[in-house]
Amino acid sequence: MPAPIAHLRPTAAALAAALLCGAAHAAPDPAPEEQQQQMTTVVVQGSAIEDSYTVKDSKGSARLDLSLRETPQSVSVITRAQLDDFRLDTVNDMLATTTGVTVERVENDRTYYTARGFDITNFQYDGVGIPFVSGLVQGDLDTVLYDRVDVVRGANGLMSGTGNPSATVNFIRKRPTSTFQASAALTYGSHAKKRAEADISGALNEAGTVTGRIVAAYQDGDSYIDRYSADRKVFYGVIEAKLAQDTTLTVGHSSQISDTKGGMWGALPLYYTDLTPTDLPVGYSTAADWTRNHFNDQRTFVELVQRFGNGWRAQATLARNTTKNDGKLFYTYGTPDRATGFGLFSYPSLYASDNRQTLAEASATGQFTLGGRRHDLTFGANWSRSTLDDVSHYGQGIGTALVPLDQWTGVYPEPAFDAGIDGSAYVDRRKSAFVAARFDLADPLKLITGVTHTKADSTGNAYGVTRFKSAAKTTPYLGLTYELAPALTAYTSYTEIFNPQSETDITGATLAPMEGRTREAGVKGEWFDGRLNAAAAVYKTKQLNTAEQAGMVGVKAYYRGVDAEAKGFEFDLGGELAKGLQASAGFSVLHLEDEQGNAARTYVPRRTLRFSATYQLPAVPKLRVGASATWQDDIYRNEADGAVIRQPSYAVLGLMARYEIDRQLSLAVNVNNLADKKYLTSLYWSQALYAAPRTASATLNWKY
């Protein structure tokens, strides 16, 4: 999870002082319409509409400046307004509100995400992808750094190069503004949750050619889970300098540090030896009282943008990311006996990991004339190198029988961690070249096409198993849009993606890469000058040759490639339904089968509903009220011993209200899980957690 920064470094303090001083020699007050434009956060991947639940354009699908209606893939946008209204302070909270996405929280401090039945492994920052992500996200990543988040569903090889045909999550960072602005918030909530955040932006020199922004947040608190507590410190600083009239240099750094105590490694046993459910209390924990986890996430980027007189734009980006984790862990395994409560055993471990990534990308975007019409073009290349080193020190006493389930209180002597050692060390490399274009075939008809050639390889070892994978593949992108009416567009698209694999078959040969292919068709609408967007789509996705363990030769596992097919329907809506009424809604239907035609990955819900809305009351214009709802149908998993673990369908409701005390101060109240519903967060693994019961928080907001 993320954690707080104990104090700002001198450079950060100096930047804050410069921003505050910048207000003193700011330009004269602009006209109201100019002021609104200047105060809106500058973003790199699209244009936001202030206080809205939608945006006017996005680069998340084809690297081109397209409106959501012009994009031939399903795109959901979570804006800053929605994040603030419903206190979606973590990526888990945010993605839980996103159409077609399932948050699989498998432990206190670890989470997977799925979309269209497959794990999400494609993550980007301002459109630059993170290579070879496993999909397992560690810690509660904070959203205070971001202006918005775009989620593009389906295969997206043009943007991502490698990964699964699930979705691509693109985090759009906050950027400096030309005029001075500042905001702060204090939150207090259930389980002694305390949170403070600040955001300052503006010009750093009198000419306004250098601007900066700093964002910071601190949060700590206990939990509904026994013995568990967490704190996190977040800092982000960015400076943007106009080196010349058409040349802009941006440098930024973010830091997120978090510490948790009493977290579970694994989760709760879900059934007894007689196969009946354990139905433990919501706050039950199998963690020992000495467990802890520390996460440190550092991200630095440099971006150079050159604009040309003919409308072309070139951009180069260099990024360096470091993610570290170390912890004292306690895993509990086994199946308890209903009558005695015995049957659980200990597995203590000391774990540390260090993941370092270097990424570079250069691209150019512009227009050209062909056949008397103007067309859009983008091309470029990227390169990345990632290293992972991790080590596990196993504790003495592995396999020690624990006290009965109903007597466990977390008391277990902390052992010496010298019973054994193992780990991983490997290097991943990836390089890609891409080109994409939108051809204006006729006034209503546009063709979006592109291709990416990617070469990826990985070498090293992981817990005694040699890791080697290498593959090169060219993936196409093809989309067609047709404007049915001024506000309505039909589209169809075909996209691909692939992922190299290190697993070997029974002969010792490395499996060929996994391949993902998505066919999609739909209709998109845009109304009220882009303030409301809606889309409906059907899709069919194939994931081919995914490694699955097929057996053992001695102590070594061998694998085979298996296929799966997903098809479904999605509806997504975001924006202003009426004056003062902002809404975000989505509904998804999924059919997922393996190559034998059987239901696959049954822990993924087949139907989900997401809804959030706020309304500014005309009779009380200073009051905004809102509600949220998430629903999913039942999920289950079959265990080897014959147990069937089920989570029936459930709905979770939330409420919010915000009152403007004056032009600068407002007070907001949020309630989550209003009906106090008890449900499991995931059946991704054979163990699981219960979700948080009803919680509430109050936030005092200030803005200038």
Image (cartoon, rainbow, N blue to C red):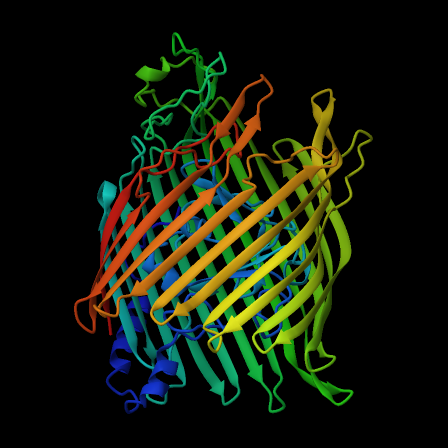
Residue 43 % position (x, y): 46, 72
Q: Residue at x 58, y 34 (%)?
A: 602
Q: Position of residue 685 (x, y in %)?
A: 53, 31
Picture quarter containing residue 650?
Answer: top left
Q: Is residue 537 left or right of residue 169?
A: right
Q: Nearer the viewer, residue 380 or 555?
A: 380
Residue at screen point 31% across, 15% down:
407
| Residue 280 image position (x, y, % from top left) | 36, 23
Residue sitting at the far right: 507
Q: Residue at x 47, y 15 (%)?
A: 399
Tell me if residue 401 comes above or below residue 236 in the rendering.
above
Q: Is residue 446 visible?
A: yes
Q: Residue shown at 51%/56% (left/top)?
A: 321
Q: Is residue 476 above or below residue 546?
A: below
Quarter occupied by residue 268: top left
Horizontally, is 79 left or right of 521 in the view?
left
Residue 167 to residue 334: above or below: below
How many callouts does the rendering have? 0
- Which residue extends farthest left? 661
Outermost residue to the top: 339
Q: Is residue 160 left or right of residue 396?
A: right
Residue 144 seen: no
Q: Quadrant of the C terminus?
A: bottom left
Question: Residue 174: horizontal and vertical position, in percent?
Answer: 41, 68
- Asked whether, in this view, residue 678 is left or right of residue 111, the answer is left
Between residue 495 and residue 408, name the one nearer to us: 495
The residue nearer to you, when weighing 625 against 261, is 625
